[in-house]
Amino acid sequence: MEQGRLFLAIAISIAVFLLWELVFVDRQAVQKPEEELQKAKIVEQKTTKETPFNKTSDAVIPDQVLLKKDDVVGAPELPRTITVNSPLYRVQISEKGAVFKSFVLKDYRARVEKDAPFKELISKDLSGGTLRTGFAGNSLPGMKDALFQTAAEGETVDIFGRSEEISFSWASPQGITVEKRFHFSAETYLIGLTVVIKNGSNQIFQDSLVVSLVSTTPEKSRTYGFEGPSALINNKLEQIKVKKIKEKSEYTGKIGWIAIEDRYFMSGIIPQTSGEERMRLLLNSDNILENQLVQPSSLVEPGTQQIYQYNLYWGPKSLKLLSKLGSDLDKAIYFGWFDFIAKPCLWFMNFLYGFIPNYGVAIIILTIFTKVLLWPLGSKSYKSMNEMKKVQPLMAEIREKYKDDKKKMNEEIMGLYKTYKVNPMGGCLPMIVQIPVFFALYRMLYEAIELRHAPFLLWIIDLSAPDRLFRFDFSIPFMQPPYGIPVLTLVMGATMLLQQKMSPPPGDPAQAKMMMFMPIIFTFIFINFSSGLVLYWLTNNILSIGQQYYISKKKA
């Protein structure tokens, strides 16, 4: 039955094919070639009158050459994409809106592999591009999808050892011309942008220019550091979490710059004119984030023009680089509450790297340096622990003797502390003082772009990623991909367990059992941390064990 249906379908297909050849093909051949050529000439004449030739198309076209499909009157002109190549980046600018469609950094790779493609800063999911322009009052409808014309003759502009300006312009039906001029320079990530509003109408034009950055929203799984829209307003850094945009989406003041940041890179707009600008944040249902810089309303008389000047930045969040560029761009790098500790540590780590070009070794030396600075606090803590260890047998006797009388037991223990001059909090307070240093180094080591794809030794080829020996095709509980053996993290957990055994157990047996689980808990927490941070914690543990052993032997 199935074969019968198959043969029937083949027979019907052949019959339709033969019928088409007999009925339709001959009719098409009847039309004379001279008539078709004459029609093509008429269309060519109409096109020439309505659309003036560009610079590149002034050559005489032979009458015998038929027009292409795109040359037919009424067909929309396809936007060109201009590619600008510099030693630092490659940017693609579409004539549709004169927006950035792609921005590739040539000094950074997308992945750690040496043959990985260069880092793309604009997501492929962003169909409309970024660096969009418009007006707050929508006084020029259609500008969003407008086709900007450029005088660039080719589709690729190479900028090596020189500067280049590329202009895009669009004339609205109302007689208003909007021009976007980009100034590229070979030696910097900064790109100049001049927006010119020319009033060629006979009426006053008034509206607020809007220049905006557009991006996809950060991944929700990333909970460390900051990613999202930011700005420098009244010389104060504002970093707005995406989930907070609904609560407040507009900020007013003197804006130094606006930006959209991720872990290691940022895009920014820096206005060159002073005034009370606004930053407006939009978040649509497709998880597309827009950070808008809204200029004060301007009035453009007929026959005059209004000029706005900006600097643009698409590049790495490098403290050293951003400090050189000025405009307080370096304030975009913020390591949280303990930023004042983290930034000197970052400077010192980079200083060490200048002599020893291995960031893993630099982290070890930095950890040793901080340990030396905090040595007095650590010594005081370990001395107190050592004294507590000596009175542990006496405390055990008191607990056994007064196990049915909690009040009496506590009184006897406090008396024991006074007799032997032991402070039960003496071992904890110095440790608490060291917590800010840990959090400062934690944020710095997580967000420092210097550690991105930076190798250490053996299997640790990226200090910004979790350490994984081997690669497994199956998932492992509590572990984020890639899956493998977290050797450095397991060694770190072992050092924590050894350190825990060296410390005197808490007086409460239940608390003592809980403390023994701490190394295991920390190991699971650190399993997905960057190997640079795990290396710091491991080095700090080894140094602490050595210091604790030295103090205990000295006081024995």
Image: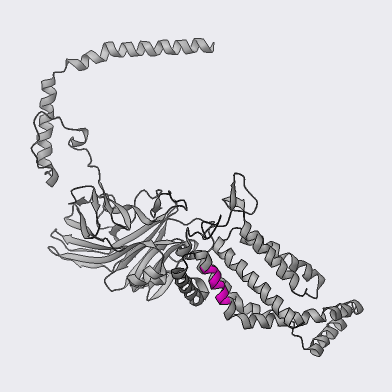
Q: Which residues fall within the magenta stretch? A: 362-370
Does the magenta segment cover residue 366? yes
| Viewer-side residue, 72 vs 119 | 119
Q: Is residue 464 left or right of residue 40?
A: right
Q: Give x and y (percent) for residue 283.
A: 43, 57
At 68% from the left edge and 81% from the top edge, which residue is drawn?
381
Q: Is residue 275 left or right of residue 225?
A: left
Q: Is residue 84 left or right of residue 61?
A: right
From where the camera sits, is residue 370 visible? yes
At 64% from the left edge and 54% from the top edge, which residue is drawn?
478
Quadrant, the N terminus: top right
| Viewer-side residue, 105 vs 368 | 368
Give the quarter of the image for residue 205.
bottom left
Please tell me whether residue 128 is drawn above or below residue 161 in the rendered image.
above
Quadrant, the C terminus: bottom right
Does the magenta segment cover residue 243? no
Give the quarter of the image for residue 506.
bottom right
At 60% from the left edge and 80% from the top edge, which residue is drawn?
374
Please tell me whether residue 337 is drawn above or below residue 485 in the rendered image.
below
Q: Give x and y (percent) for residue 262.
A: 45, 60
Please tell me whether residue 493 is drawn above or below residue 5 in the rendered image.
below
| Viewer-side residue, 551 vs 94 | 551
Q: Give x and y (percent) for residue 270.
A: 32, 67
Please tell me whether residue 433 is drawn above or below residue 243 in the rendered image.
below
Q: Give x and y (percent) for residue 289.
A: 41, 57
